[in-house]
Amino acid sequence: MNPRRLSLLLGLALVPLALASLFWDPAMLHSVAARDPGLARTILIELRLPRTLLALLIGGSLGLGGAAMQGLLRNPLASPDVLGPSTGASLGAIVAGYFLGGGVFGVALGGMAGALLALALLLALAGRGAATNTLVLAGVAISALGGALVNLALSLAPSPYALYDVMFWLLGSLADRSLPQLALAGPIILIAGGFLLARGPQLDSLALGEDVAASLGVNIARLRWLVVVTTGIMVGAGVAVAGSIGFIGLVVPHLVRPLVGNRPGAAMLPGALAGAALLTAADLAVRLPVNGQELKLGVLTALIGAPFFLWLVVKDR
Amino acid sequence: MIASLIAHDIARPPMLAPLSLRIDSGCVTGLIGPNGAGKTTLLRALAGLGAGPGRVTIVGEAPGDLPSAKRARRLAWLPADRDVAWPMRSGDLVQIGLGPGAPRDDTAIAAALALADATAFATRRVDSLSTGERARVLLARALVARPDWLLLDEAVANLDAYHRLDIMALLRAEAARGAGVLISLHDLDLARRHCDRLLLLHEGALVADGSPADVLSPANLARVFRIRETPLGLEKAPPV
């Protein structure tokens, strides 16, 4: 399919999903509006709007980041979680939560600082001009180290309540996010995403190997670090606001790539839109009460994503 | 007539000793030598890949310094390995040869596929093609921008007899339009019949350079390739 037509279709699919997310439970909204129109407006603007837009933006950033990483590393198993920025962001947000009191900005900035720190470590470990395989292995090692440090931070939690808060935050959720959080993460995701999308043709040429791409004028070392750092910042901003939401970045590129003739660069925009649609749909599903609790978004994406990924692997075996 | 490609003192230790050479456009130059002689390393160095001393220039410019839009038309390098990371369609693969960011040009893609006798594969996924078929699609990728220079590493290695001759005739036609062609070959018969000039590499050094008849002398065949010609064909030379 033409990538433009696919993007248009996916973009159209976003409209009903976004409206459903915005006006979830219309009966409740209606009764609130009848009693107190001001309260209904507050709910819509200060709760629903950030939740909807964050689902679109973060879902999009995960799908786009996964497509970009897979194209760059020419590896269908790559995703932002693999190279460490997601784990780094979790760690940074937890540490900021402990020491800065858990304010919205403190946690968000801690998350982005953690993602960038993980990337700085990656750059230092893998070195400039490192082979792609070295980069992946270093990323896996940093992810493992970050995971261990997250567990250390959890076991050193100052109080059971703090532990409970952090653990729930780590499960990933978009409930009760605020406009300031949207104002913080939104521009970062949009700018980084636009920057990544512009690298599409260069990622396409990587299909023939780094040397052929270099012979066509692609500066491989520069492209590699630009894509890694941009993806890291983008994903870090998302994790800092919503916690860790797994599998969207890994699975979405596999869904859209075959539809655009398996071109890694052409899969990026449809990947972003499909990621946005999936996360928004998942965020609608978690609002259906299960056992009186709202399900956590990251739990749902992993519950659906992991078996789906297994199916993809078995199908292509 | 397009200017010559000139290599000044390029070296890639330990694979390639320092060497300078000049290759003229408008003719087909063959690069021959046993396994490990440095053919691939030399072709990569001429394409501006890999780090090492020396300089390669075409009309006074280093191809590596050109912006990518210009570079695809100046020089194409075709590696010997046929790996494609994603199961893309042949036509999309050929488009890559126009350079990143170049607008899609279906006319040029169709023309390049036709040159490599790969038109039938245009909409097929490369993972469904045989090695030789894929080699022809990848050759079309190198041809699509109609570059001034073609640096081809074992471009006919996996091809059947018909397509070897077909591609050598194609390279002859590319040279006739003014392109410079440098192709590494293991098939000495093709090298003798279809190249204007041969470069013979041995253990990382350029040991012979000239017409096929001169370079493929009995002395060179025995010393470098350890073979000799007999009326029945080539056979192993007795150890010296």
Image (tube, coloured by chain):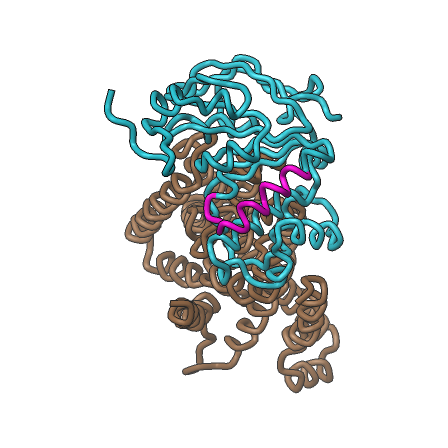
Chain colours: A brown, B cyan
The structure residue drawn at horizontal position 63% and vertical position 50%, both measured from the top left corner, is B94
Q: Position of residue A309 (x, y in %)?
A: 42, 67
Q: Position of residue A301 (x, y in %)?
A: 46, 68
Image height of B214 relative to A250, above or below: above
Placement of the N terminus of chain A among the 4 image quadrants: bottom right
**Residue B164 lies in the magenta-colored region:** yes
Q: Residue furthest front?
A: B231
Placement of the C terminus of chain A among the 4 image quadrants: bottom left
Does the rendering let one see residue A56?
Answer: no
Tell me the magenta residue range. B157-173
Q: Is residue A187 rendered to the left or right of residue A210? A: right
Q: Is residue B61 rendered to the left or right of residue A289? A: right
Q: Main secondary structure of the magenta part?
A: helix
Q: Position of residue B73 (x, y in %)?
A: 70, 36
**Residue A218 lies in the magenta-colored region:** no
Quarter of the image where one finds residue B12: top left
Quarter of the image where one finds residue B170: top right
The structure residue drawn at horizontal position 50% and vertical position 20%, both measured from the top left corner, is B214
Does the rendering let one see residue B78?
Answer: yes
The structure residue drawn at horizontal position 64% and vertical position 56%, both measured from the top left corner, is B91
Pick the residue in front: A240 or A85.
Answer: A85
